Each structure stands twice: as structure tokens, then as C-alpha cells.
């Protein structure tokens, strides 16, 4: 919900600023213009920027569990830069409302232009930072539940399904081949019985569907290892919930 409000407020702010820029470009040689469209922008810009900033803070609080996760990751540092840019744009929006919009029919165009151009630059920088955030996985300090199955027949479905309902994610590790393996059966059953609890696709870490070589070093490279498991866990954690 916070993400949707954040996007709507950002779109309203950007659209209103674009309209204001068009109004100023239409009167490059004038000292004043009609205050109605400018005042409408001022009335819209300040609350929308505040909403963008507030919803961004709420999203950050949901994403991060500690301050170190903000300072030590690329996602966190980029988010800090974006927040600073939004705060700067908020200052310019406030200045436009206080100083460029006196209580008279006209608006001081040169002053408003000097305030609007930096704000427009900050908006462009915010959009660039948002584009970078889309390509960066947010850090998650999520505890993992490890289920070590003692048998496959019978299999403890209650424990598996309860864990999926709690976490919304599943990584199955199996040294057998990917096709017709226990990992395939577990993944299929979880989709049948707990599909609506899943927040990301199921990850299977298995031996590839190929023959087992005679060389022990090759066998070691073929079987799942800790790097494969960590990569699978990161993929399922970085998947964004629809």
C-alpha cells in the first residue's frame, strides 16, 4: 500500500512540476505571470513531496532491520541519497511557496524560475536514483527455517507447509537429479497446497540432469554446494511480492 501511494504522489509531483515549467517557458521575457496556475502547483507540490518522503521512510523501515544494513549496502546508500534529494526538493518547494508567491495577482517569474530549475534537477536525480533502486536487491535480515527431513516415506508435510505459510518462500536442496527427484515432488506439492502463501517462486538446488562423472573433483563440482544454496536463497529473498 505504501509503495502505491508513493508512486502516485511522485507522479502527481512530477506532472505538476512539468506543467509549471511549461508555464514559465511560455513567458521568458515577462516579469510576472498569472498566479493561478502557479498557486495551484504550490498547493499541490508541498503535500505531495511530503507524502513521497513519508511513504519512502515507511518503505525503508519495512525493508531494513538495522542501521548497518542501510550504511553497508548499495541499496541502502542509494536510498539515503534518494531521500536527501527528496528533502532538498521539499526545501525548494517550500521556498517557492513562501517567497515566489506573494499575496498579489502576479508572480515574480525570475525568482520562481531560479527556484524551479534546481527543483527540476533534483526531481531528475530522484528518478535516476529510483531507477538504480529497481536494479538493486534490498537487504533482508530474514531468519531462515531449516527443515532436515528424516524420511521421504512418510514425509512430514505439516512441517513443510507450516514453514511456507510463515515465510512465503521455499528453497529445496537435494543431491538427486532435478527431474523426478524429491525436490520436484516437494515443490509440486507445495504449489498444490500452499500456492497463495508463496511470495516468490520455489528454488530447487539439485544435481543437474546429467551423468555422474568418475572423477571425484568433477563429482564435487556437480553436487549442490553452499554457494548454490546461498545464491538460491538470495534470489528468493530479492523477489518482490506482487
Image (tube, rainbow, N blue to C red):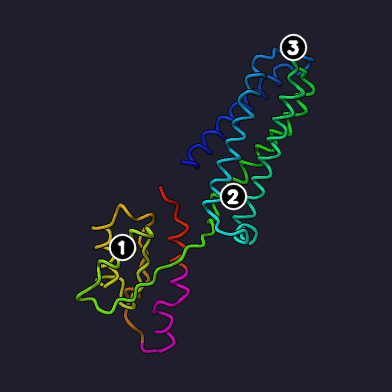
At horizontal 58% and vertical 28% (from top left) the residue drawn is: 15
- Looking at the rendered structure, the secondary structure element under dot 3 is loop
Magenta-tinted stretch: 214-230
User: In front of the other: label 2 or label 3?
Assistant: 3
At horizontal 23% and vertical 73% (from top left) the residue drawn is: 155
Can you tell which mark lies on residue 104? Answer: 3
**Do residues under tags 2 and 3 come within 8 Å of each other at their CB atoms?**
no
- Residue position marked by numbered label 2 in the rendering: 132
Work out whether mark 2 precedes mark 3 in sequence or the reverse, and give the earlier one.
Answer: 3
x then y, percent, for residue 52: 58, 38
- Looking at the rendered structure, the secondary structure element under dot 1 is helix
At horizontal 32% and vertical 80% (from top left) the residue drawn is: 211
Residue 205: which quarter of the image? bottom left
**Position above or below: 232 against 81:** below
x then y, percent, for residue 116: 72, 28
x then y, percent, for residue 193: 24, 58
Measured in 3D between alpha carbons, the distance from the residue under mark 3 to the one under mark 1, in whole angstroms, is 66 Å
Can you tell which mark lies on residue 162? Answer: 1
Amino acid at each position: 500500500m505504501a509503495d502505491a501511494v508513493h508512486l502516485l504522489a511522485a507522479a502527481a509531483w512530477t506532472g505538476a512540476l512539468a506543467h509549471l515549467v511549461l508555464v514559465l517557458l511560455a513567458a521568458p521575457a515577462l516579469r510576472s505571470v498569472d498566479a493561478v496556475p502557479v498557486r495551484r502547483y504550490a498547493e499541490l507540490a508541498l503535500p505531495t513531496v511530503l507524502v513521497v518522503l513519508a511513504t519512502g521512510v515507511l518503505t525503508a523501515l519495512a525493508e531494513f532491520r538495522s542501521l548497518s544494513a542501510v550504511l553497508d549496502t548499495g541499496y541502502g546508500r542509494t536510498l539515503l541519497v534518494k531521500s536527501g534529494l527528496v528533502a532538498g526538493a521539499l526545501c525548494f518547494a517550500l521556498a517557492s511557496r513562501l517567497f515566489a508567491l506573494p499575496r498579489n495577482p502576479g508572480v515574480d517569474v525570475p525568482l520562481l524560475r531560479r527556484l524551479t530549475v534546481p527543483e527540476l534537477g533534483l526531481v531528475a536525480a530522484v528518478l535516476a536514483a529510483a531507477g538504480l533502486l529497481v536494479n538493486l536487491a534490498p537487504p533482508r535480515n530474514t531468519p531462515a527455517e531449516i527443515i532436515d527431513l528424516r524420511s521421504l516415506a512418510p514425509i512430514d508435510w505439516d512441517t513443510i507447509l507450516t514453514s511456507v505459510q510463515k515465510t512465503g518462500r521455499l528453497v529445496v536442496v537435494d543431491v538427486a537429479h532435478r527431474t523426478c527427484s524429491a525436490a520436484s515432488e516437494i515443490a509440486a506439492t507445495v504449489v498444490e497446497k500452499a500456492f497463495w502463501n508463496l511470495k516468490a517462486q520455489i528454488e530447487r538446488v539439485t544435481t543437474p540432469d546429467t551423468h555422474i562423472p568418475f572423477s571425484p573433483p568433477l563429482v564435487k563440482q556437480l553436487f549442490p554446494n553452499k554457494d548454490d544454496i546461498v545464491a538460491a536463497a538470495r534470489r528468493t529473498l530479492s523477489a518482490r511480492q506482487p
